[in-house]
Image (cartoon, rainbow, N blue to C red):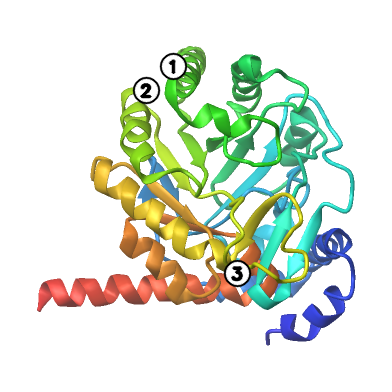
């Protein structure tokens, strides 16, 4: 039985950050009950290999919901095929002042200007060490707010070294709109230098550990189409393993006039859906066929997840859709992807 439609009105009476904490607390409690196993078993198997990793299904949790990797056990109950935690910075930081998270319920959207609030990498690693690992775990890395943009690579290298032995894959977040000048790293010489430095650090860590940890880059939906070919060339040239498309948008045309629409920060949910899918399609057009894309942005149903897959994504992630739809969304998407794969196989056989 899906209880979330009954819980959502109660949660939405709370301010968004309080509701966020309450929901994660409820999940932590549920992880100790039979509900956890029932929920997980309700999500169909859809095993796939991406980035050299085995995923039990193609539906993942996007970074941002579990910033400190403090709720891995509870979130694992929802049946995700993979989890991504963070964004983590080398040093703990409080993020931006509250209020910093806003609902746009009429658009099934959120605006956040959290600012990479987290307890730091070492704290998160301690949480991960205490949590059961049932699916691949990605760790999303950012730079500290007071690290100059020209020194950002130092923070990313330090973060990569710290999490390398723990993460199944690592995401480099250079697309949040809530850290000053961070998006300047997405293009030109800054992007090339960042990828070169990350590739060098990853190779050093690979040689020391004998273990290859995939690297993904998370990009913004606000890139211009003409920027995509150069971005793709750099990703391929420096041996990056995947691209995550996309982060939140700073655009507001689809929510103009709605309450909270003028709040500063990144907009997520239904209004970013179409642009995210367009970016995925543009990436797929220019990327090698076997280069993985993880699609995220406005996924709130099985059909909207299929849009990302049809555009060229290999895996999908959800966040805002989960806030509005609840745990049942994970199974709905996984089932839709299974059905699509079966239909494609039958067509090929027929």
Cβ atoms under marks 3 and 1 closer than 8 Å:
no
- How far apart are labels 3 and 1 at the CA level? 40 Å
Return the disc, 3 or 1, that comes first in the chain's sequence. 3
Residue that label 2 marks: 238
The answer to which image quadrant residue 310 occupies is bottom left
In terms of sequence position, does the residue under pointer 1 or pointer 2 come before the other?
1
Please say if the residues under marks 1 and 2 sit with CB atoms less than 8 Å apart: yes
Classify residue 160 as left or right of residue 56.
right
The secondary element bearing badge 1 is classed as helix
Q: Residue at x 82, y 82 (%)?
A: 9
Label 3 close to label 2 by CB (< 8 Å): no
Residue 154 visible, this angle:
no
Query: Residue 40 has which mark?
Result: 3
Earlier in the chain: of badge 3 and badge 2, it is: 3
Q: List x then y, in percent, for residue 243.
A: 43, 41
Q: Quadrant of residue 118?
A: top right
Residue extending furthest front?
257
Residue at the (50%, 41%) spot, across then down: 219
Q: CA distance from mark 3 to mark 2?
A: 37 Å
The residue that disc 1 covers is 196
- Looking at the image, the residue that sits furthest to the left is 350
Instruction: Rate crowding at label 3 as few (under 14), some (14 to 19) or many (20 or more) other CA atoms within 10 Å.
Output: some
Residue 334 appears at what percent x and percent y? 47, 70
Name the image quarter holding the N terminus.
bottom right
**Observer able to see residue 338:** yes
Dot label at residue 16: none
> What residue is drawn where x is 50% and y is 64%?
273
In the image shown, does 335 or 281 lie closer to the viewer?
281
| Residue under the point 71% across and 53% down | 65
Mark 1 residue crowding within 10 angstroms, few (<14) / some (14–19) / many (20+): some
Q: Secondary structure at mark 3?
A: helix
Give how far apart the Cα atoms at labels 1 and 2 are. Answer: 6 Å
């Amino acid at each position: 039985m899906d209880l979330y439609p009954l819980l959502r009105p109660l949660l939405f009476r709370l301010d968004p950050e309080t509701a966020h904490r309450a929901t994660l607390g409820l999940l932590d409690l549920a992880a100790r009950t039979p509900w956890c196993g029932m929920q997980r078993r309700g999500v169909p198997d859809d095993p796939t290999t991406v980035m050299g990793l085995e995923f039990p299904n193609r539906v993942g949790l996007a970074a941002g919901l579990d910033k400190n990797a403090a709720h891995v056990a509870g979130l694992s109950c929802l049946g995700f095929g993979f989890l991504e935690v963070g964004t983590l910075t080398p040093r703990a930081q409080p993020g931006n002042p509250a209020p910093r998270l806003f609902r746009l319920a009429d658009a099934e959207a959120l605006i956040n200007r959290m600012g990479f609030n987290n307890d730091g990498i070492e704290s998160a690693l301690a949480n991960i060490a205490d949590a059961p690992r049932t699916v691949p775990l990605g760790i999303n890395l950012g730079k500290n707010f007071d690290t100059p943009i020209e020194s950002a690579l130092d923070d990313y290298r330090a973060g990569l070294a710290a999490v390398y032995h723990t993460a199944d894959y690592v995401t480099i977040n250079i697309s949040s709109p809530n850290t000053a000048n961070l998006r300047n790293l997405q293009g030109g010489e800054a992007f090339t230098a960042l990828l070169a430095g990350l590739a060098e650090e990853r190779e050093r860590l690979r040689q020391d550990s004998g273990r290859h940890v995939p690297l993904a880059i998370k990009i913004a939906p606000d890139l211009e189409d003409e920027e995509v070919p150069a971005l793709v060339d750099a990703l391929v040239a420096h041996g990056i393993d995947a691209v995550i498309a996309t982060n939140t948008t700073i655009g507001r045309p689809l929510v103009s006039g709605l309450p909270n629409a003028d709040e500063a920060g990144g907009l997520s949910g239904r209004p970013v859906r179409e642009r995210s899918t367009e970016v995925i399609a543009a990436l797929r057009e220019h990327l090698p066929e076997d280069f993985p894309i993880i699609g995220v942005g406005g996924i709130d149903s099985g059909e909207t997840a299929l849009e990302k897959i049809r555009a060229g994504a290999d895996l999908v992630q959800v966040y805002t859709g989960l806030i509005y739809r609840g745990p049942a969304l994970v199974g709905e998407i996984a089932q839709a992807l299974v059905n699509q794969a079966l239909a494609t196989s039958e067509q090929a056989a027929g």
